[in-house]
Structure formats: structure tokens, C-alpha cells
Amino acid sequence: MKIHEYQAKDVFAEFGIPVTAGRVAFTPEEAETVAKELGKPVVIKAQVHIGGRGKAGGVKLAANPAEAKEKASQILGMNIKGFPVQKVLVAEQVDIRDEYYCGITVDRDERMLVLILSAAGGIDIEQVAAETPEKISKVHIDPLVGLWPNQIRRAIFESGVDVLKMAEISDIIGKLYNAFLAKDCSLLEINPLVVTKDGRVLALDAKMVTDDNGLFRNKELLKFREIGADLDEIEAFAQENHVTYVHMPPEMRGPVGIAGNGAGLVMTTLDVVARAGLKPNDFCDIGGGGNVEHTVKCIETVLKDPAVKGFFLNVFGGITRCDVVAQALLDVQDVFPKGFPVVVRLTGTNEDKAKEILEGSRYTFVPTMKEGAEKIVELINGLEASA
């Protein structure tokens, strides 16, 4: 789950990481009020879950409250890369001497966390990595032993940041690491981490992405979840019902809804359906050993997008019992509109029982995944041709 900059800064403050003063505003008038409270020049920053806000005009400086109101009115309502701006952060301006990048994320190849530090802050770290990789210091963190002070010092010396600020930067990195672990993050980033002209070291921006699987330990973060910003309504429904669901990005969505058991089988099903000629719209993994109620909820979730014109269920029963899935299909048959194509492949544990349960049903049965993919594509195309 992604959270906004102003929310991540609250987390930073909780862990003692120094941030600039400010708060969120939803209207130009609120932005003016916050600027008055701060009593100094401010920066107005769009709060959307996308990078490149500055280049898109979503970050503006204001010298006084009246300007803050004017600049906020320019930013609120903008659309930045498909994300509407509904709120802005109004924060104090600071005189910047140096800008650095500091972040912790997961290096899946190395199976470790990695601390990334660079003197080239304020721009995309990916661009720095591509054009000047020598400006980036990466220190891998063994999860069994944690982050050691000597590793932080090494990162500081290798990155080119001001070593005279080692004490402050080391302290911030240590706190960033503590926050990363405590909040079950997959990414925690300060860009830029700045040294001001009066010598302070501050987190000027904040980016935080948490692992959804850890949210049960950090329920206070759930209040930051926003339908329309981080999840769409169907994804939120899936999460509330503990359904493993993926809604394809809008530009990639086709008319086929897919469900299966096991990530590997489901991903393969997506590929085979695409190869047969139509794009998947969404999919869910019903998992192993699920009961009828959970399977019903999975199917209902996939069907929630009206753009889904046909449904392909591909189950290879192992721990998952085919008779359980069949009973779920029987329970949801009234959910499918009349004439809506449903193709089912059920093979494996209790396959015979499943066939007995679904005998005489309206579903189209296939023996293999390939045939199922081709059949759902054929049926959807036929439906559209006759419309």
C-alpha cells in the first residue's frame, strides 16, 4: 500500500526523523490558513501516488498566504499522469545547500534489504543509476543481523554526501531502518534528504510503500487507504474479503475474467488466454484448501467489472478439491447474466464428484487449459459478433 507524502512524514516524525513543518489542505482557503499558521514562505505540493509532480507543475512556491491560496488553486484539480489532485501539502520552505537521496528497499535477487544513498538527490534515482551509477552507494542488509553502524559509515563515505554531516545522516538512516522494519515496508525513501544553509539535515520529501501482508500488524495505517488513489473499488472489495485479486491496469484490460488456483497456474492461464486472442481483464487466485464461501467470493470479485464479458475458471485440484469449487460454481450460477460465457476446466482431486455436482449445469466444460482459453475467446468473440 502506498501512502501520501504528508502521511509518510507523520510516520517519520513518529520515529524521530526531522521533517519540515506543514500540513495537508483540501481547498485553497485551507492552504492560505496553513501558510498563515506557519508564518513563512511555503511550498505547495500535490499529494498523488505518482512521481514527477514537480515536472508536471504540481509543486509551487508561495511567498505569503495569498500566494499560497493562489498556487493551491492552480494545483488542486490538476490531473497528474491520470491521478486527480484532491489535496496539497503546505510546508515551510527551506534554504537548501545540498540534496541527497536516501532509501531502503528489498533486493529480491540478493534476498536482503538494501540501503541506497547518493549525493545526487532530488531527481529520479533510476536516472542516476542509469547515467552515473558511481554516484550511488548500495549496502545490503542481512535480515538476520540487521544494519550495523559501520555499514552506514561505509554508505556515507562511498556516496559522496557531506561527511561532516555524518552524525546527523547516520542518525536519520538508523531511524529510517527502524521505521522500515516496524511498518513492514517494501520501500521507504527520502528524496531529497537535504542539508540546509543553516546546517540542518531534513527529510524534505517522503515515499512509503508497505507490504499489505503486514498490515495486520500496523492497522493504524489502514486509515490511509484511499479508494481511487491506491486501490479501485473492486480491489478494495477483494481486500476486505481476503481475496487474492489483481485488476489489470486500465490500458491493458480485455474482456476475460479469470480464476484459478495457485499463482503459477493463474499466471500461465493469463498468458494462454492472451495467446488465444483476447486480453484478460482481471484474475484471482482461489488458493489451496479454500471453502465454498471463499470460492464464491473470488468468482463474484472477478465479475464485478462490467467490462468482463466471459469467465474462465481453470483449476488443477491438489489441496484444492474440485467438488468444493464445483459447489461454489453451482451457488453462483444465478450471478452470471443470461448468455454470459463461462468455461470451466476442473481436474484433479475429487474431479468425479465435481462432475456429478455440475451435471446439467449451463457451464462449458473443457479438458485442458489450452482448450479452455480458446473456447472462452471463441464464445466472447461470437457474442460480440452477434450483438
Image (cartoon, helix red, strand yellow):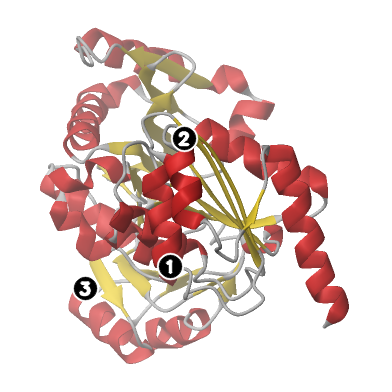
Q: Earlier in the sequence, mark 2 or mark 3?
A: 3
Q: What residue would you read off at disc 3?
A: 38
Q: Disc 1 to disc 3, how far (Cα)?
A: 57 Å
Res. 48 in view: no
Q: Residue at point 47% right, 74% down?
A: 335
Q: Most extreme residue toward the right, as rendered? A: 385
Q: Residue at point 36% right, 36% down?
A: 288
Q: What residue would you read off at disc 2?
A: 262
Q: Residue at point 28% right, 78% down?
A: 35
Seen from the viewer's position, the closer of residues 98 and 197 is 98
Instruction: Please tell me whether mark 2 or mark 1 is closer to you in this view.
Output: 1
SS category of the residue bearing label 1 = loop
Quarter of the image that includes the C terminus: bottom right
Instruction: Please tell me whether mark 1 or mark 3 is closer to you in this view.
Output: 1
x, y percent for residue 25:
30, 79
Q: What residue would you read off at disc 1?
A: 332
373 vs 216, left or right, is: right
Instruction: Please tell me whether mark 2 or mark 3 is closer to you in this view.
Output: 2
SS category of the residue bearing label 3 = helix
Q: Earlier in the sequence, mark 2 or mark 1?
A: 2
